[in-house]
Amino acid sequence: MAQLSPLLKQATPVVVDHGEGVYLYDVEGKRHLDFTAGIGVTSTGHCHPHVVRAAQEQIGKLVHGQYTTVLHQPLLELTERLGEVLPRGLDSLFYANSGSEAVEAALRLSRQATKRPNVIVFQGGFHGRTVAAASMTTSGTRFSAGIGPLMAGVHVAPFPYAYHYGWDEQTATKFALRELDYLFQTVSAPNETAAMFVEPVLGEGGYVPANSEFMAGLRERADRHGILLVVDEIQTGFGRTGKFWGHDHFDVSPDIVLIAKGLASGFPLSGIAASEELMAKAFPGSQGGTYGGNAVSCAAAIATLEVIQQENLVENAAERGRQLLEGARVIADKTPSIGEVRGLGLLVGSEFTTADGEPDTATAQAAQQAASKNGLLLLTCGPYMNVVRMVPPLVVTAEQVDDALRIWGDVVASVTGS
């Protein structure tokens, strides 16, 4: 009898029968508020009718048209639609299936285009589980332990995670940029550095937003040294942060953008976007893949973009995100165990710490598990897994946010005794 790998650790005990909007219904008929959204994937909610219809219609026409063999209409239409929302100057796309594949494609492009070997990533970043992507991931050792030696040429600079350092944001930012300059002098010379990969908000690293000064500092150094700035929008893109792109908050222009997760409302699709000039500098034949740009996934992505626009989901993410952040902070103000609540848009994290400021993983895990028993599905993140994150679909309503905060407040009070 076959079974799932024991290495797959379930965050909740829920066995799902079906989903609708912000809700998941288990096999016993119980309804759960899903504030995980499949780790930020179901941007338009579960089984949005417009996305479902698009996928159903496409399945009846063409399921798989391998896109280095033949082209198909959904692929061409999606590329045109993305051209309307991509950052200025990024007019060339390569499609894959997963975030990790997008990261590796951007790594390959960066090294080939610049003819430089090294890349810089930032402490707490998550870029994937495949070997190269895991080598670039520092949000937790669980993603790279036991598979070494890891890929060479990856160097890590600090991210301005002010709460972790016990500093204000300005101090943390100045430190991060100063240490980046020091890294250029001591570890990876600028003319040996192909790219810097950065998330606008650390995802697995604890839902820590970057800031304008930090991102501007990266852009300035990239321009000065001929280094590519690669912005990983896999979790933050497509309205998640209350702007279409996470980096829009910081008024910075990337050279390469990575996309996945919320792009196709649950269908596997990822990609990278760059200028045609930059793409052309890579080696012919270096991009490809069997399932990339799948016809059904592309159709779902087109429908997703339509829903995001027609239902004003970027604006909704901003409004509901403010409501969620403010509500979570009210709960934290009454809870000494929660050291900080932070986020952008519908990415909100509550970091649990002990009385002496150390990570409190046990309480965070207890709160997350208690929430799931009370009908609110949440996840943990951060290097110590002591941050409970809320990442609902972009279609979430004010009433649903209130329901989630009510459950969260009750759960936190019961777990912490506050």
Image: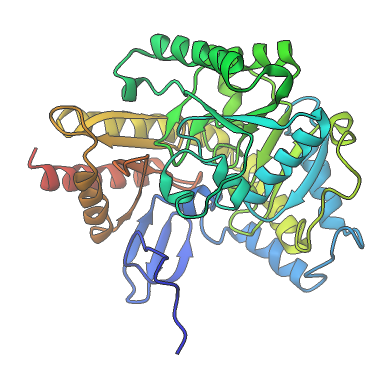
Point out residue 105 in the picture as x, y percentages from the top left corner: 73, 44
Point out residue 397 in the picture as x, y percentages from the top left corner: 42, 44
Quadrant of the image containing the N terminus: bottom left
At x 69%, y 57%, the residue is: 300
Q: Residue furthest bottom?
A: 1
Point out residue 65 in the picture as x, y percentages from the top left corner: 84, 66
Above or below 362: residue 241:
above
Quadrant of the image containing the C terminus: top left
Q: Is residue 210 left or right of residue 407?
A: right
At x 34%, y 73%, the residue is: 29
Residue 408, visible in the rendered structure? yes
Above or below 216: residue 404:
below
Q: Nearer the viewer, residue 17 or 53?
A: 17
Q: Nearer the viewer, residue 28 or 380?
A: 380
Within the image, what quadrant is residue 254 found in? top right
Residue 84, visible in the rendered structure? no
Within the image, what quadrant is residue 336 found in? top left
Above or below 143: residue 108:
above
The total of numbered circles placed on residues is 0
Color style of the picture: rainbow
At x 13%, y 47%, the residue is: 415
Point out residue 281 in the picture as x, y percentages from the top left corner: 88, 33
Q: Is residue 416 left or right of residue 296?
A: left
Q: Nearer the viewer, residue 314 or 415?
A: 415
Within the image, what quadrant is residue 139 found in? top left
